[in-house]
Structure formats: structure tokens, C-alpha cells
Image (cartoon, rainbow, N blue to C red):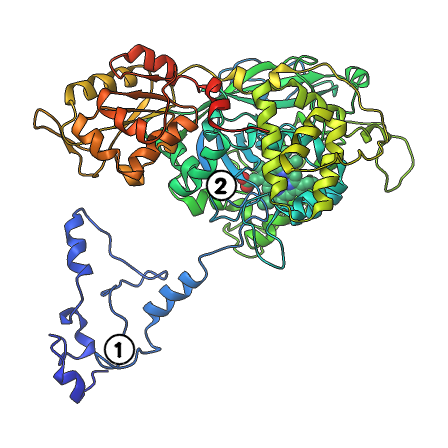
Amino acid sequence: MARPPTARSQASKSPSATTPSSTQSDTYRGNAGELQQQAGGKHPVLTTQMGIPVADNQNSLRATPRGPTLLEDFILREKITHFDHERIPERIVHARGTAAHGFFELTHSLKKYTTAKVLTEVGVQTPVFTRFSTVAGGAGSVDTPRDVRGFAVKFYTPEGNWDLVGNNIPVFFIQDAMKFPDLVHAVKMEPDRGFPQAASAHDTFWDFVSLMPETLHMVMWAMSDRTIPRSLRMMEGFGVHSFRLLNAAGESTFVKFHWRPKLGIQSTVWDEAVKLQSADNDYHRRDLFEAIEAGDFPEWELSVQLFTEQDAERFPFDHLDPTKLIPEELVPLQPIGRMVLNRWPDNFFAETEQVAFCPANVPPGIDFSNDPLLQGRLFSYLDTQLSRLGGPNFAQIPINAPKCPFHNMQRDGHMQMQVPKGRVNYEPSSLQADTPRASQAQGFRHFAQADDGVKGRVRAESFADHYSQARMFYRSQSPLEQAHVASATVFELSKVGTPHVREAVVGHLQHVDPELAQRVADGLGMQTLPPAPPTVEPVQDLPLSPALRIIDRMKPTLQGRSIGILVADGSNGTSVANLRKALEKAGATVKIVAPKVGGAVMKDGTLLPADGQLAGTPSVVFDAVASILSPDMGAQLAREAAAVDWFRDAFGHLKAIAACKGTQAILQAGGIEPDAGVVDPADVQGFIAAAQTRQWEREPQVRTLA
Ligand code: HDE
């Protein structure tokens, strides 16, 4: 209803001051409507959820131009109500993640072992959706804390979805699902104070570790460089548990799944990971996004370890214990296929947030082992989606729905999207010719396992050895990696305020390796070495597994690596262009960094646009850095903290540096004593060779490791 203008509104300068609200098209609308016109294109009419066209998306319905808003405004109410409900509960673990679409292509058939088509039909490309995650932090936390990374792959196979829900570490902290809520409570922020976020370096986590020695093997992995990956594209992935493959004759073979990145495995150094948290919260997410957008599609090889029940009996550990791995020196890896991620999701919420993985999703031909952790997981994942995604129909959300035909008699429930036809929603039935029926020939079969024993809440005796593989892992590392493990443990325990917790952990380390225990004790400033606790089983000296190292296995390549070139006004544009061309030819992504994002005017007067501003693009986001600066600009930047830190950090993070003469003043200001990893940018090949790896021999010069 049109209202007469009030005295106040009449006084208003607004052109709409005397306009009745029923003729809103003439009212003052603010700038937004006009600005939108610039976007161009053919736009559909904006509507409400009910399809009612909307005339004004800037202004709510007011009683008078400066009066109260009317309850009648169904457009405003609908918009705000929907907005109020935009969030769903985040995952209790693995809340922060990022994902991409792609395909899996089988290269070697496992027909002898399984009937699962995804593992038998060579050359067929199965669509996949893969989500990577950190574990402890909330959805809004950072990408680079010290943490395990989730590596979950949903294969949309012709026989239903197969979810291989793994991690980037091949073992787990605990042996029994019963302890998972305790583990997660201990590592998440402490309940009374609400911190620390996304960190294991606090009392409750280490208290749990100190009282649960089964965690020790995974703790060694967590303290290694595996938990500070350089990129999601440079991480390995593991199915962790033993699964079974079942062939047409019903025979079973145990299998462990491994993903190996084509770009090679690579990690950051700890100080770099810490600084990345302030430089770019979304470092890993952005890296994956930029690579896929650039057509530089990340790829992993899928390998399997196959072994029989009889093989397993000869292992010096129980393969059903998820705190144990099978060294590839004992059971070799057989490559069977590749996964390529080549499409970024259209919408983060609809796909990455709503994707629901579940280790119980396996097609016929794959079956579970009796690993007690896996058995618990088979329940948890479906259950968690009921509250996270709001009801039992989450499988109908497009990202979760199978891409093969599916039929069942499950009906109704919240958010039912399907409209089933006919009278029959039960089985058996005789009223309708096209209702779904079970099929002995195609249906899922479980391995017919004969088990005997006595029911009880027990832990198998074969699970009692908690230290031998922790020792194997630690002693298999290169000396520098061992120093990283020791230093990381010192760092974490230094954040633990309770002395008896620190002491108990060091006591356990005596069983892993007495020298490690001593290093950590020294690093913590302990005056005496705490005693080792009693063990149930003697610690075994298992054969070492060099395949568990990272540094030796880093791939010397510039593929997937990013190099920053610092320029400023007066830089030699030809030298910059030549260096950039050579680096790009070698596979690197090159970014120009300048004091101002608008770019720098080169010596010849041309403007070179910058990809990043110096203060906002620290060297931590690059794998190697170069600079081409005039002596004048070099001298000026030597007084600029951002420039000095750029080189000091690159040096401290063991990166190759190509520094021209003009840059020397900055290096001096940073106290950098050039070594073999610091070259002249004119020596392009020397720089490429140095940038393909880290300058590991520099590390003892730049920091004291435990
Ligand atoms: Fe998970 N885990 N988990 N987990 N897990 C979840 O499921 C759980 C375990 C893993 O990107 C939750 O949908 C239990 C091992 C990944 O969406 C939840 C136990 C491994 C992801 C859950 C484990 C994993 C999850 C939380 C011990 C490596 C992220 C939200 C019995 C093999 C998947 C959700 C994604 C997520 C339960 C142990 C990997 C609560 C009970 C071992 C990669 O259901």
C-alpha cells in the first residue's frame, strides 16, 4: 500500500523521497545496480526459490524511505533465512580440505586376484574425486601445520562407488577404533581453553602419546618431514589397512594400496612451514588450484602390495595391526595404474564440502580385513554423514551419487530428491515386473572366512610390539632426516608445560633409539635421561627400509616447482626475460616480484608487470629465488626488511639463489655467506641444477638441529 510521505522523508534529498513504494522501479537504488551493468552478457531474471521474479535486489521493503522494514518482505526474509542456514557442521576430523576431479586409468590388470572391474579393465578411465585434508584443524585453519594429510579418493566405478580413504602416512596412531575419540579429543584444541588450533604441540596430545605406546611408530612419522609437505601434488598416499581382493573363484589375496606422486615426494623445512602460515593460509589449496588451472595436471601412480595369509604368517609383525607397515623391501610394490586430477570443482560447498567418503564403499571383488581400526571405520563414516549432511539421503547429492545405475527400495526421509514410481517399495513382491532384485551372479560377496576363538574385549598378543617398527622407521632415515625428527620432537615437547609428560615421552624414545632419546633430552635441557618404561615384547632390530626416506628420493626436477624473480626499476629486462624463458623451459612456474604490484620500469624503459608485491610475496612461497637489480636499487632494497628477509629466508630454507651483482648489498645486509647454492643469474644452467633440489649441506650452517 502506498503511504503518504512523512515530514522527515519529505525533507530527504533522495529522489525517491516522495515516491510510493508500489512504484519501486523509480526509487533510488544505490550504485550496485548500475555497476552490475558493466559486467555485460545475457542475464536470466533473478527469482526467489519459488521462481518469483525479483525487481529490486538492493533495497528491502520499507514502510517509508527512512521507516521500518516490513515483515511482508518475503524476498528479504527468504534471502536472509537461507543465508542463516548456509553452514553445515564441519567434519570432526579432516575439516580443512581441498579437492579435484580427475580419472583413474588401470595399466596392469589384477584379474588373477579380483573381479572388481576398476582393477581388471586395462585402459578404462574411471572418474574420480579426490580430497586432501589436514586432520586436526578446523575448516578455517591453515594449510601448513605439522599434521597428517588425508588422501581420500572416490572412484565412480561401473559397479558402484569405491572410496579409498587414506592418509599420507602408511600407519596410524592407534590399533583399535575404541581409542579414536580419545586420540582426536587429545589432539584437537584443549576443551577448557579452546586452543591450540591445528597443532599437536600441546600437553593433551603428548599426554595421550605418553600413555599409549602404540602411538610411537606414527609419532615418528608425524615428527618427520612427511607432515610438512611442500605440495599436495608431492605427497604419497596410503590405504593404511590391509584389504582383501577376491577373484571369481572366491579366493582371497591381501592388498595394501600406495599412491606415488609423479612430481616426486618433497617436503618443506619446519621454519618454512611456520612462515607459510602467515604468508599464505591457503598455500596448498592455491598450489593445487593454480596447477590444474594451468593445465599442469597432478598425477599419481597407484601401486599394490599383494600377499597371502601364508606370507603374512612369516612377517615379524601382524599386518592386521594398523600401526605396522609392510616394508616394500619385504613385499615389493606393483604399479597398476595412474590417477590424474584435471578439473577443479565448480563449487566448493556442493562438491568439496558435501563429498562423503566411507571406507565401507567397495565394489564386488574388494573386501575388508579384520583390522580392528578398519572395522570401526566401516561404521563411523556413514554415521557421521547423517549429522553432517542432515539425513539419510546424502548419497543423492550429485558428488556422492554413483555414476552407474542404482536401484533399491530405500524411501522417503529428509531431502528426498527422487520420485519413485509404482506401488512396490518392498521385496519380495509379485505386483510389478521391474522392481530391483538381488543377484547372486553380480552381487557383492564377502570372503568366507573361518574364524575361531573366544569372544571378548581383548587386544591380540601379536599387537603387543609397539617399538620395533618405530625404531625401523627412525633408523632408516638419512642422518639429516633423523635430526629433523629429533628437532621436531624437541619443538613439540617444548610446548608441553607438564614435566612428567615430557619425561614419559623421552622414556619411550629410549626403546625407539637411545641416541634419539638422548638428543631429545639434551634439546629439552633435561639433566638426566628419564627411565624407559617396561615393554611387553623385546624390541626387534628389523631390517632397515631406505624406501621410507624422503631426501634421497626427492626428484631433481623443476616440474611443478615455482621460482620468484625479484626486479625493481632499472633492472635489465633482457636478462630477466632470458632467465625466465630458460626456467620455464625446464618446467618451472616463474613469478615476477617487484616492490610495487604495478611492476617495474626496466632499464630500456619498458614496464614489466609484477605477479606479486615484495612485502606480500615472501620467498617461502617459492622453491628457489633469483634477482636482477641495478646496484642503486640493490643498495636501496638492502635497507628494506622485506627484501632482506626474502633472501635470508630463502637461504635459511635451503633454496637455490641466483643473485646478480646488484643484489650483493642485500645479501650482505642479511648476513648471507654465499655457498654453492648461491649463483649468478647469468649461470642459468648452474641455477637450474641448484634449484632442482634443496641445499641440504647448508642446513648445519643455518640452524642448530637436535
Ligand atoms: Fe577417518 N574419519 N577415522 N581415518 N578419515 C573421517 O568422516 C574415523 C582413520 C580419513 O576428505 C570422518 O566424513 C574413525 C584412518 C580421511 O572427507 C569420520 C577412525 C584413516 C578423512 C572418521 C578413523 C582415516 C576421514 C570425519 C578410527 C587413514 C577425510 C568426517 C576407527 C586410513 C575424508 C567424515 C574426506 C574422515 C572416522 C581413522 C582417513 C568421523 C572412527 C586410519 C582421509 O567418520
Residue 24, image x, y percentages: 18, 72
Residue at 59% across, 54% down: 387
Residue 34 left/right relative to 252: left
Residue 143 left/right relative to 194: left
Among the 4 quarters of the image, the one containing residue 277: top left
Residue at 21% across, 39% down: 597
Residue 451, image x, y percentages: 86, 30
- Residue 62, numbered label: 1
Residue at 33% across, 62% down: 48
Among the 4 quarters of the image, the one containing residue 659: top left
Residue 176 shows in the view: no
**What amino acid is labelled 1 in the image?**
Arg
Figure check: 65 above or below 163:
below
Residue 93 left/right relative to 544: left
- Say which label, 2 or 1, has the lower sequence index: 1
**What amino acid is labelled 2 in the image?**
Gly
For mark 1, give the secondary structure: loop
Tell whether label 1 touches label 2 (CB within 8 Å). Answer: no
User: Which quadrant contains ligand 1?
Assistant: top right
Badge 2, how many Cα within 10 Å: few under 14, some, many 20+? many
Distance, label 2 to label 1, CA atoms, is 42 Å
Q: Residue 448 versus residue 560: which sits nearer the camera? A: 560
**If the image is split into quadrants, where does the N terminus sit?**
bottom left
- Identify the residue under disc 2: 97
**If the image is split into quadrants, where does the C terminus sit?**
top right
- Ligand 1 contact, mark 2 (Cβ < 8 Å): yes
For mark 2, give the secondary structure: strand
Among the 4 quarters of the image, the one containing residue 613: top left
